[in-house]
Amino acid sequence: MKTRAKKTATSKAPPQSQESKAESTSKHTLSAAEQNPPTAFILTESTSADGLSRFVTLPHPAAGRSHRYYVDPKQGCYELTKVSVPKKACRSMLLTPDFQDDAIGAGDGERENGYMLKTPDLIIATPVDSLFLMLPALWSAGKSGAGEEWATFYDRLFSDENNGYMHLRQIFRSEAGNDLEIRMEGRMGAVCDNLDMGEDKLYKLNIDKLAAVLLQKAKRMVEVGLPVSMEEHFVRIPLEVPEISLRREDSSISMVEEADAAEGAGPQKKAHQANQELAHLLRIRTALKYLCTNYIPPTFAPRLLAIIFDTSEPQAIDFAPLDTHLASITKLKSEAQALRSISDNISRKRAGGQDEEGLEKAETKRRKKEEEERNKKNVSQGVKKLAKADTSGMKKLSSFFAKGAVAKKG
Amino acid sequence: MNTTCTNKSTVLEARLEQAQLLKKVTYQFSFISLTRMLTPQQVVDAIKDLVQDCNFDCNDSGIALQAMDNSHVALVSMMLKSESFSPFRCDRNIALGINLTSLQKVLRCAQNEDILTVKAEDAPDVVNMVFESADNDRISEYDIKLMDIDQEHLGIPDTEYAATISMPSSEFQRICRDLTALSESVAIECTKEGVKFACNGDIGSGAVTLRSHTDVEKPERNIEINLSEPVALTFSLKYLVNFCKASGLSDSVKLCLSNEVPLLVEYALSNNSYLRFYLAPKIGDEE
């Protein structure tokens, strides 16, 4: 969100000014890089035709700062995520019109319509539950502790002290915005206790409800499947048992005890099943943590997590086996690490030494031998004998005679 | 001495009546011996056992050579003046880097009475040697590949030596050979009474003393000792024996000594040419 210039819903296509500029310059000179280059966005496929979708500034649920969102009254709210390449990766992005569409009419001139982006950063709009967007408005109520106030949906969002939702208000005023308003109010209801006051409903944040919603979302995330990188980082690697066969049995025994339901199956299958369960637990926990860090203020997250992990609740998930398993794995890993650092050291020394140094030595030895042999052929007996003469106590002649300035050479 | 200079690109052309001289020189340090057949062969013989390869620096005053042995404690310096050759022509200074063993091999192909002609072109990669037998019936020709030799050249000053001894080269050779049997090094003491070569080895000790001696009938057997102050120095016999291989080049040898400077062993050749050896004394190593 750093570039604020030329931020339009149609920014998929290059801006007009750029095109004309490119045409005016000759083929061989490059136009100077733009001071404030446009940014590529990927927005929803079908934005509202009436042009009601907007970029709006709303408070970020976790950070509290203002943050930009893309709101389409019909489709809901979208958060914007910047996807950037590492700085070292020298890449740029070429944007061209869809050739399939105008393949027939596409002449050479058409092709020049492409636009080169120096930095291939992309900003992608992804749907987000409007519930999260409203959370900041609900926290403010939550802060006051026991004496929490009841307030209507409108009062919550558009109170005098809290004008972060001004942009939303404008959208709500439109016809399509009405739908959005109703939907958002429904989402607010999902995490709040409500009080029906006839025409208006009063809302108050219920943390338990929020916790339940979060847990629900986490489960959904796991069902759909965590992103590959998250799965790899937070699930597969932490559950990886170091390769010490003895120890592994230790940890799987405890697993087997728990999974006594599958008694008919062989112990291997049981272990496998137990591992699957553990992985599932870990996935849920990972998803929960992800949600909390992204949408819940850091001061509030621990309290929420405590509620979710509270085992006294009937619906709560018991993460205890996972914890014990993870603890045992970390212990194993540290042991393996300690062992490995010793053995690794030894093996590396050996391997490195024999492979390259050895070869090199042999090579130089061989070369020396060859050279010596060649020299020997051209050395007279007398020179060889002299080489054995005892020259101790004899100074080099260069210490008696100055080195001649003229080295007589042709 | 017939001269022929048909090849215009030839920069060096030196004709030596006695191929043997160069041969002999080669030997010593592996020297070249140019003598009576004067002996390029002998010269080479004389030096080839001391050095492996060396540069023959050719200029209009003659052919010079300076080389050190591998341990850099001995040095051979040869000067074959242009007068030794006839004709001698050298248009430009050139250095011929020659492996002495190779040179010796070629010189062996010459017979003692052969006339040797050395030729080299400008910026040569070979040196050409022609041997003509005295009656001109047989001409043999050899090319020796040249080498690039990086040698440090030492500037040797003219030194006033405290003691100068002239003696028959065969006498010096005999002394060295005899004493080698006893020890590796010889102490040369020069006093008014004479010069004493003494050695001390595992099996015992030995000493040879020479006094000034003048033989009217055979002046080549004279022993002359010129002394300004007494000198006593120790030298490696192995090197001295090596120097003695040049004995065939000259009837007499001159030893020049001063305390704490290298010994000079000089074999004078005809026409002011010479073959000189320098050897560092052994210091602080009393055996």
Image: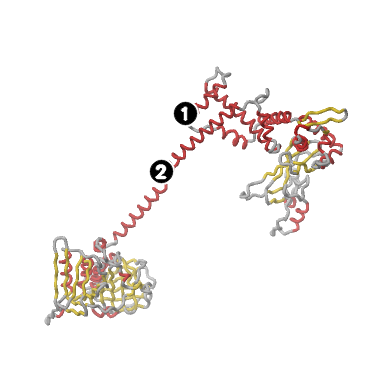
Q: Which residue is mark 2?
A: A350
Position of B248 with respect to A296 (left or right) is left
Quarter occupied by the C terminus of chain A:
bottom left
Amino acid type of the residue tagged 2 in the rendering: Arg
Q: Quadrant of residue A51?
A: top right
Disc 2 crowd rating (10 Å Cα; few below 14, some 14-19, many 20+) is few
Is any part of residue B132 visible from this angle? no
Amino acid type of the residue tagged 1 in the rendering: Leu
Eye-nearest disc, 1 or 2: 1
Q: Is residue A281 above or below residue B187?
A: above
Q: Is residue A41 above or below residue A243?
A: below
Q: Quadrant of residue B244?
A: bottom left
In the rendered image, the residue lying farthest to the top is: A264
The x and y percentages for residue A259 are: 57, 21
The x and y percentages for residue A315 are: 68, 24
Position of A229 with respect to A116 (left or right) is left
The x and y percentages for residue A204 are: 79, 31
Q: Chain of mark 2?
A: A
Q: Quadrant of residue A145?
A: top right
Is any part of residue A190 visible from this angle? yes
**Residue displayed at 42% across by 41% down:** A346
Q: Secondary structure at mark 2?
A: helix
From the viewer's side, name the closer residue of A117 and B259: B259
Disc on the earlier residue, 1 or 2:
1
Q: In the rendering, which numbered label is found on residue A407?
A: none
Position of B256 with respect to A144 (left or right) is left
**Residue displayed at 34% across by 55% down:** A368
**Residue displayed at 17% across by 76% down:** B191
Coloring scheme used: secondary structure
Q: Secondary structure at mark 1?
A: helix
Q: Chain of mark 1?
A: A
Q: Which residue is mark 1?
A: A246
